[in-house]
Amino acid sequence: MNIFKNTKLYSYAKINLFLNIVSKRQNGYHDIQSVMQTVNIRDEIMIKYADEGIKISCDDEAIPVDSSNTVWKAASLIMERYGLGDGVSIDIKKTIPSGAGLAGGSGNAAAVIIGMNEMFDLSMTDEEMAEIAVEIGADVPYCLVGGTCIAEGIGEELERINDFSWDNILIVKPEISISTANVYGKVEKHMFNRYDMGEIVNRISGMEYREALSFTGNILEDIVEEIHPEIKEIKNAMTGFNALLSMMTGSGSAVVGFFENEWDLDKCAEALKKRYDKIYKTKTVKKGVELCMTS
């Protein structure tokens, strides 16, 4: 086994272009249909070899550094499955805000799976990495892949489609943080299958990206807006600055705006900076995790 001492990776944020709930399973999980997309907001993950155990550090004091962190779960599962007697030290530098619906924690876990596979020369297949990922969380399998994907089941059934491409995206994260479990807990049966995924997939597949924005949807948006009207206020502000579309991503609380040009995006960002600290100008990317360095 060729063990590297250090591995550095980037994990990218996820947005939902489409989110429909199909049904609820007996175990409480929901079957979904989603079109997921990664954007160019990224965390940095540095994994270092240690003699034993798992140690986590993070530059964001709000992020737990114990066994509740997704990266700890990823490292623990890999160490157990592959009988690793060695340990790892994992340092997380955060840019992706937590409680935003941007899959920051899930992406960090995906980075650890890819990083430890490389670091310990485990030769895991994509399927083996996905098996570990789904044990950690529903978004982790997607974060291994990134780009534009249809996600079904609880999010683990993935199909890559033609890449959606958009350069002028604004993401605003208000101070409120949303519990995904709490939001899904408020989904009622009459809300199932509200949207049809076929049209947005067809438009993206045909590289009709502007037209695709007419067929987005997020079933969780109404639930969160009722609890936190601020979400709708941000959406309205974006459309007031000529956003072609503004929508909440995932279970929130981040709001995503798609602009036709950089000028409108900048004007909107400047206006919203007067009220919100966490504002990100970004664009789509084609990856979920980027392996930068092994040494």
Image: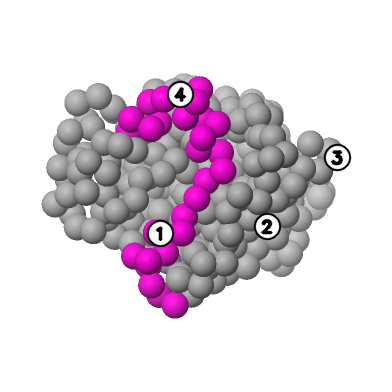
Alpha-carbon distance for marks 2 and 4? 27 Å
Q: Where is residue 66 in the image (x, y as percent from the top left)?
A: 64, 26
Q: Where is residue 249 in the image (x, y as percent from the top left)?
A: 47, 43
> What is the number of the mark on residue 214?
1
Label 1 or label 3, whichever lies nearer to me, is 1
Q: Which colour scheme is used?
A: one colour
Q: Where is residue 230 in the image (x, y as percent from the top left)?
A: 38, 26
Residue at left offset 75%, top offset 61%: 128
Label 2 or label 4, whichever lies nearer to me, is 4
Q: Residue 33 is drawn in which quadrant?
A: bottom right
Give the position of the N terminus as an image quadrant: bottom right
Q: Which amino acid does label 3 sit on?
A: Gln
Q: Which amino acid does label 1 sit on?
A: Ser
Q: Is residue 233 above or below residue 171?
A: above
Identify residue for label 4. Answer: 228
- With 23 as the anchor, is 109 left or right in this view? left
In the image, residue 211 lies in the stretch drawn in magenta:
yes
Q: Give the structural element (helix, strand or loop) at label 2.
A: strand
Residue interval drawn in magenta: 206-234
Alpha-carbon distance for marks 4 and 3? 29 Å
Q: Which of marks 4 and 1 is nearer the N terminus?
A: 1
> What is the number of the mark on residue 26?
3
Residue at left offset 40%, top offset 59%: 214
Q: Check if mark 2's residue and mark 4's residue have beta carbons within 8 Å.
A: no
Q: Give the structural element (helix, strand or loop) at label 1.
A: helix
Identify residue for label 2. Answer: 152
Q: Residues within 10 Å of mark 3 (few under 14, many from 20)?
A: few
Q: What residue type is labelled 2?
A: Glu
Residue at left offset 34%, top offset 50%: 245
Q: Give the structural element (helix, strand or loop) at label 3.
A: loop
Q: Which of marks 2 and 4 is nearer the N terminus?
A: 2
